């Protein structure tokens, strides 16, 4: 039986992608105007609006009805579905998918990625790998449940301004951070965003990011990995890659790069860089 891999746009999986993969868009609202992430609002357009606007946008979870429509279309086409979705601790999207999946027992399998953005994306890419190896949908979902604990997502933020605007840090903390050029390093752990450390300046921030990756035991290059950035250009990410050559140079000739979209970009703002990978086990 054919397999359909589904995910939400919070995974930041952009076209072109395999025809067996479906991305359901999240809604992003700026003021009174609502857009579908990745459909009529590109990542570039999102950051243009974010930088120009005074108020933070809001994001909306995908409804059970939209999941049910997508699941039904796949099942009626003779496909079984593996849906990999945004962390249940960050959004109600996982609950929506589970509610919809109840209508299709044994045909739809929902996996809580326990992650977001490129951390969710590498799990989607792992699902595609397992599909091409010939595993059925139930086996793919079971493997993803086992392997998702190996995923590490770490990021270096350029500014505290957007965390302040979102009410996640105080104005005084953001002001001091800006004056001292503080660069927080954050990670997704157990499905939630955690602060791992803080550094003064981009160089020290890059070094701290490298250290946090090394602490995990390093990157398992036999499984998917990804680097991403927020904002309108990848200059800071390119600098990080140069500063962290020891992590990659002996293993790969090129690194897969992508953009981090609105679901996470709303909270961290432009200028952040992120690395997602399966750790060596």
Image (cartoon, rainbow, N blue to C red):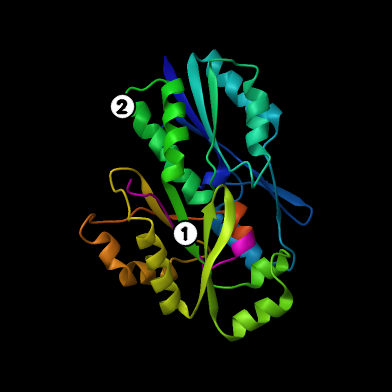
Position of residue 36 measured from the top left corner of the image (x, y, whole percent): 64, 44
> In the picture provided, is 200 more to the left or to the right than 34?
left
Check if mark 1's residue and mark 2's residue have beta carbons within 8 Å: no
Q: Which residue is mark 2?
A: 133
State the residue in front, 125 or 102.
102
Tell me the magenta residue range. 267-281
Position of residue 197 measured from the top left corner of the image (x, y, whole percent): 52, 70
Real-space Cα separation, disc 1 to disc 2, in angstroms = 29 Å
Mark 1 residue crowding within 10 angstroms, few (<14) / some (14–19) / many (20+): many
- Find the residue positioned furthest to the left: 250
Whether residue 96 is visible, yes or no, is yes
Count of marks overlaid on the render: 2
Which of the 4 quarters of the picture holds residue 76? Answer: top right
Q: Is residue 60 above or below residue 215?
A: above
State the residue in front, 196 or 209.
196
Q: Is residue 211 above or below residue 221?
A: below
Asked if residue 279 lies in the magenta stretch, the reply is: yes
Mark 2 residue crowding within 10 angstroms, few (<14) / some (14–19) / many (20+): few
Residue at the spot 41% in from the left edge and 33% down from the top edge? 127
Q: Quadrant of the N terminus?
A: top left
Position of residue 56 measured from the top left corner of the image (x, y, whole percent): 71, 62
- Dot 2: element: loop
Residue at the spot 57% in from the left edge and 59% down from the top edge? 194
Q: Quadrant of the C terminus?
A: top left
Q: Is residue 24 above or below residue 205?
A: above
- Of labels 1 and 2, earlier in sequence is 2
Residue at the spot 67% in from the left edge and 33% down from the top edge? 95
State the residue in front, 42 or 268.
268
Whether residue 13 is visible, yes or no, is no
Residue at the spot 53% in from the left edge and 53% down from the top edge? 188
What numbered label is drawn on residue 154?
1
Q: Is residue 75 above or below residue 186?
A: above
């Amino acid at each position: 039986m054919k397999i359909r891999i589904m995910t939400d746009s919070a995974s930041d999986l952009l076209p072109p992608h395999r025809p067996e993969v479906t991305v359901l868009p999240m809604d992003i609202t700026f003021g009174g105007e609502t857009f579908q992430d990745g459909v009529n609002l590109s990542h570039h357009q999102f950051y243009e609006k974010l930088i120009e606007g005074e108020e933070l946008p809001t994001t909306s979870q995908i409804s059970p009805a939209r999941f049910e429509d997508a699941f039904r279309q796949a099942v009626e086409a003779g496909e079984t579905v593996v849906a990999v979705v945004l962390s249940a601790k960050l959004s109600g999207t996982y609950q929506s998918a589970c509610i919809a999946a109840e209508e299709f027992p044994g045909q739809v399998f929902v996996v809580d990625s326990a992650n977001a953005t490129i951390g969710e994306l590498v799990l989607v890419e792992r699902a595609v790998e397992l599909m091409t190896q010939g595993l059925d949908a139930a086996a793919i979902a079971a493997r993803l449940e086992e392997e998702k604990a190996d995923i590490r997502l770490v990021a270096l933020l350029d500014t505290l301004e957007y965390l302040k605007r979102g009410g996640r840090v105080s104005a005084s903390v953001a002001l001091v951070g800006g004056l001292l050029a503080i660069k927080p390093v954050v990670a997704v752990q157990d499905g939630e965003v955690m602060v791992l450390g803080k550094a003064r300046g981009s160089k020290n921030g890059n070094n701290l990011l490298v250290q946090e990756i090394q602490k995990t035991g390093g990157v398992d290059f036999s499984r998917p990995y990804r680097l991403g950035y927020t904002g309108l250009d990848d200059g800071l990410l390119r600098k990080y890659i140069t500063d962290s050559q020891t992590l990659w140079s002996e293993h790969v000739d090129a690194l897969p790069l992508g953009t981090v979209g609105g679901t996470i970009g709303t909270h961290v703002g432009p200028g952040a860089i992120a690395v997602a990978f399966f750790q060596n086990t």
